[in-house]
Amino acid sequence: MSEVRRRLRPLLGLWDVETTVGGVVTSKGWTSFAWADDGEFLIQRADGGPPGEDVPQEWLDNTPFPTVSMIGYDDSTDQFTQLYSDARGVFRVYNMTLTEREWRIWRSAEGFHQRFAGTISPNGYRIVAHWEKSKDGRTWLRDFDMTYERPR
């Protein structure tokens, strides 16, 4: 197994995902990670279930599901790149790093910077994460929280 594949391996498989905004569950769905092109890339697919009753209208208006991402490696920067697309017609390019316990995703775009931080549990069965957003890349606001759990 290549070093790149070994580094991405903690994400492989199916995950149950719960998204919350301000403590309110906005989405319960799933995401999966699988090798593509004989392991040269990792493809992520995600979808959400029906929203709960207390979901803020802003979340309902911006629900991205389903989503598809392709993750590849840049050996000149020792970072991963994630190409993201969703049902709203949004297409984005993110930088990404992944270690045994930390997963980071970020992008700098004028007027809408984003960053994701996830902590992988020691047993690899849970990831606690959150997304933040910024208009200027300096002042950050919590966007939403996510919990990934492997089905048992």
Image (spheres, rainbow, N blue to C red):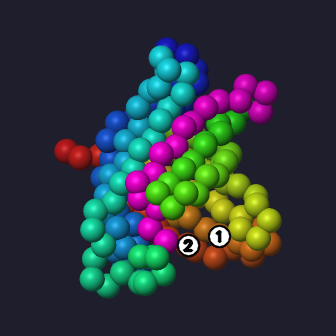
Q: Is residue 147 left or right of residue 75?
A: left
Q: Is residue 4 left or right of residue 86?
A: right
Q: CA distance from mark 2 to mark 1?
A: 6 Å
Residue picked out by circle 2: 143
Tell me the SS state at disc 2.
strand
Q: Residue at x 80, y 65 (%)?
A: 110
Q: Which residues are magenta?
A: 62-77
Q: Is residue 64 left or right of residue 94?
A: left
Identify the amino acid type marked 2.
Answer: Asp
Which quarter of the figure is the C terminus placed in?
A: top left
Tell me the SS state at disc 1.
strand
66 is within the stretch colored magenta: yes
Q: Is residue 118 visible?
A: no
Q: Nearer the viewer, residue 29 or 62?
A: 62
Q: Residue at x 46, y 76 (%)?
A: 61
Q: Residue at x 48, y 81 (%)?
A: 58
Q: Is residue 21 visible?
A: yes
The answer to whether 109 is drawn above or below residue 32 in the figure is: below
Residue picked out by circle 1: 133
> Residue 23 location in percent, x, y?
39, 79
